[in-house]
Amino acid sequence: MNTYTTIVGMEIHVELATASKMFCGCKNDPFGATKPNIYTCPVCLGFPGALPVPNKKAIEWTITLGLALGCEIQLYSKFDRKHYFYPDLAKGYQISQLDLPFCKNGVIITTDGPVRINRVHLEEDTGKLQHTEINGNKVTLVDYNRSGVPLVEIVTEPDIHSGDQAKEFLKKLHQIIRYLGISSADMEKGSMRLEPNISVRKVEEKGLPNYKVEVKNINSFNFVKRAIDFETKRHIELLERGETPKQETRGYVESSSSTVSQRSKEEAADYRYFPDPDIPPLRLQSSYVESIKKTLPELPDVKVVRFIKEYALSREEALHITEEKTIASYFEGCVSLAQSAKDTQMLTPQKIARSIINIHDEERSPKQLLETLMKKENEKQVDMSVIVSALDAVLDQQTKAIDDYKHGKTSALMFLVGMVKKELQGKGDASVIETELKKRLA
Amino acid sequence: MKANELTLTNAIKKLQSKKLSHKELYEDIEEAVKRKNTQLNIYLSVDKQAQQKAEKLQQSVLAGMPFAVKDNFLTVELPTTASSKVLEGFMPPYESTVTKNLMKNGGVVFGKTNLDAWAHGSSTETSDFGPTKNPRNPEYLPGGSSGGSAAAVAADVCLAAIGSETAGSIRQPSSWCGCVGLKPTYGRVSRAGVVAMASSMDSPGPITKCVEDAALVFSCIAGKDRYDATTVDAPIPDVVHTLKDGIKGYRVGICYVDHEKLKGTPAANAVIEAGKLFESLGAIVSYIPLSQQLEKNKILTPDYAIGIYTVVQRGEVSSNLARYDGIRYGADRSKFGAEAKRRIMLGTFALSKYFDENIYEKAQLTRSLYIKNFEQLLTQYDVLVSPSSPGFAQKLGASKNSPMFGELEDMLMEPTSISGLPGINVPSYHDETTNLYLGMNIVSGQWQEEKLLRAAYSFEQATKWNSWK
Amino acid sequence: MQSKKVSTHDVAHIADLAHIPVTEEEKENLAEAFTTTYGVVDILSKANTKGMTQTQQVTGLENVTRDDVIDETRMFSQEEALRNATTIHNGYFVVEQVLDKS
């Protein structure tokens, strides 16, 4: 299928983990609420006369995210009302941002190229609906605990061209969000939601296709890939037949890794946007934005490069160790502790990294981790004489390996090192054994 | 004189000097309510515990005085209906900031008054619970949308009232009922807990028997509110004390009397007479000519204001009424009355993709013309004066079948309302045969309530139009 | 700005957007009212607004925000939140089953 290229733009929603909601002082914990409708007030329930007052921290965190994504920050901004009727939308309009989003023009670099971020804006979340039956009647139950929770919307340009690229992009975005500590970004809890917009065109064509399909109900990064793969195939089949795929919204079906058509409107929605008169505009000082920039933590990409350089880790080790900011900090804590005392200086960053990577289900303080490693080191110390006798024993047996090595097969050497180690029951320094073997076989 | 016929200020004085008791006062009020309410349809609900509440408030600023509050202010103890069947029987779970402030200062919410449903109108005829009648002459309307509150004052069934204005809804009914109505600067008084009409213009304010009362109530309800992001942190001027400082040297500008709809009318003449009076009190009075476009030292014709107000107000109304879906409170949308339906639909229309041009944007651009105009004029003048209403109160039935009734009636107030400026109505003429009144509108710059109150007080004291003097 | 006649079909569409049920008679009356309003609004086209910016906030206020703290004084108990609803069930508000966002 190389004659076609897939074109995907992503829309991601992230719930910010502020203490209170976006426009009122209600507790922001919809997932943790033990009962429905316990974190509400006149504002988020849309009672008559209730007025919104924006959450300062939510604005700050939106800008923080924008800066981490390399965006330009809009110094003059406002909130707009977006109108539609749905039971989970208490006021009959959602307070969002239309033409002056807080952040614009960012980027995330993936292996297959840069994915540009068109905008990052701030809005409020809706309540939650549950369809059920009461006494034989089909009803919908409404819970407003989530109504008014601060929600950041991230929209990319259609720069993603495969399911794999989409996955990589999302993983990077997810990691950045967690590094910033602004959201749990947990797809199962609903604090991160994704919608890809997918279309397909021939490789040689330029510009965007004249249709796109939005896919909803995707609960994991893997499902995004499957949805994109399925849609790509489906669109190509239609295009090959001379048909244009219908512009619509489809739902992802987990059990069959496919998508199905959902009831769609023929025309684009008329949201009747206008600036919210209840909320005065925001005029941010560039000094304010600069001060936020200073609070940005070292981001994953930068940390990986530094760890490779500073700690002589392999790229894979560095990626693993920096996956979560807490683990990266823990690693660096162990390293500096090891460096601080003379007798622990042999515990190299690589050894520490490998230990952390291999043993991840135990909670160990840096001190405990070093103690464990030192114990191993000491066990590894064996007398040279013991090594030599083990070496003798192995060289006696492994005549084929000796022969292979002498004929230029370098892997045979590693095989012999392994056999000596086995003889020594895992003890002994591998590099010392290797050196001895080379001497003996020279 | 019965206790209910006293002004707020005088009643407080009497009460605090033990010349009057709460029992006496409330008995007189309740007797008046009994006599008049059925015919005039002023109160939709009344607090039967009012007197008991009052008795505990002797020492406070408002000393337990009974207030009539427009039924679009949310009150926990009394139903809040906005005069609509959609909210019939609605008992709010929270209190409006204005009534909270009133009570904090010792006022008592005696009852909730009738209004044009959702505050959509200038007659109180569009209430879902029947029109209110003008106490001065019950064949006539009280004006609107705060018609019930203005009537409550005129009928002496309260000592003062609270209303709200988007464009004329305090000043116009005050004009038609012959009482004082103050619309503060937009942003002075909190809108939290007031059923929203046009968010960028709604201003709660007092309707009272005299200017001194208006100054007192204003100082009790104004102030920044953490629950309303559009209230300002500006200090409230000491209006109660500066009230009587006179207007010597004040520069007074007379407006709109040369407009084609007003030339030679009694309303215009009353204002021209007022101008002469201001001069005799030491003010410097001039006439500001009307102009069709923005021009220095001229007042921009109010004709565009109708268009602006229509679009912005109806657009905001359609948005603010979207929350009434019958899920969390109230009845479903089919219970909206005809006028409400019309405004919601027209507002939706104005905001929709239907129009090739964005008329909401055009309206907001034109609104800036008025703001600029007033900014310039109010560097040249301390106050601007005009008729409040083009004429006397109109007869019952006048508002029906006139889709633009409200906006045309309020034409003179729309320019200052869309600019957020403060204005006060004072009675400017009384017709002995009909017992009806004309009103004069005095406007000052943003946050300058002090000036208009001084001018209003001086005028009131020097003339005979106030029926409580 | 176009001064055109508004049809009952237009009115039906707007009624749909606004979620307002209207009868055939109401549609006729509203079509007339819309057309009248168009005329009044049309006068705006005569105003010269060159060089003006849109008014959004007459107060001149900017940057009005609140600190990220929980305000227990304003939060409702579940009972208070549900008290005014017509239909409730196990702590939820209840509506007839909905399908699509409109």
Image (tube, coloured by chain):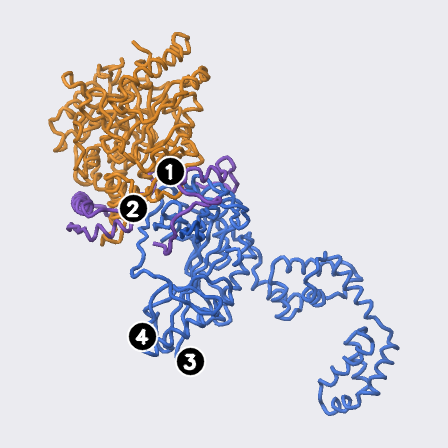
Instruction: Name the residue beneath numbered marker 1.
Output: A48
Output the letter for the chain in purple.
C
* Same chain check for tags 2 and 4: no
Proximity of marks 2 and 4: CB atoms separated by less than 8 Å: no
Residue under mark 3: which chain is it in?
A: A
Disc 4 to disc 1: CB gap under 8 Å: no
Type of amino acid under label 4: Glu
Give the spatial CA distance, label 1 vs label 3: 58 Å
Q: Name the residue beneath numbered marker 3.
A: A2
- Mark 4 vs mark 1: which is more N-terminal? 1
Q: Which chain is orange?
A: B
Q: Position of residue A364 (x, y in %)?
A: 72, 58
Q: Is residue B132 above or below residue A422?
A: above
Q: Callout 1 environment at 10 Å: few (<14), some (14 to 19), or many (20+)?
A: many
Q: Give whichever of discs 1 and 3 has the lower sequence position.
A: 3
Q: In terms of depth relative to the viewer, which is nearer, B195 or A282?
A: B195
In the picture as drawn, the residue positioned furthest to the front comes out as A135
Q: CA distance from mark 2 to mark 4?
A: 47 Å
Disc 2 is placed on an element classified as: loop
**Chain the render paints blue:** A
Q: Quadrant of the C terminus of chain C?
A: bottom left
Q: Tell me the number on the disc at residue C53.
A: 2
Between the C-alphas of marks 1 and 2, the distance is: 31 Å
- The residue singled out by tag 4 in the image is A243
- Disc 1: which chain? A
Circle 3: element type: loop
Q: Are marks 1 and 3 on the same chain?
A: yes
- Give the distance between the C-alpha atoms of the residues marked 4 and 1, in whole angstroms: 50 Å
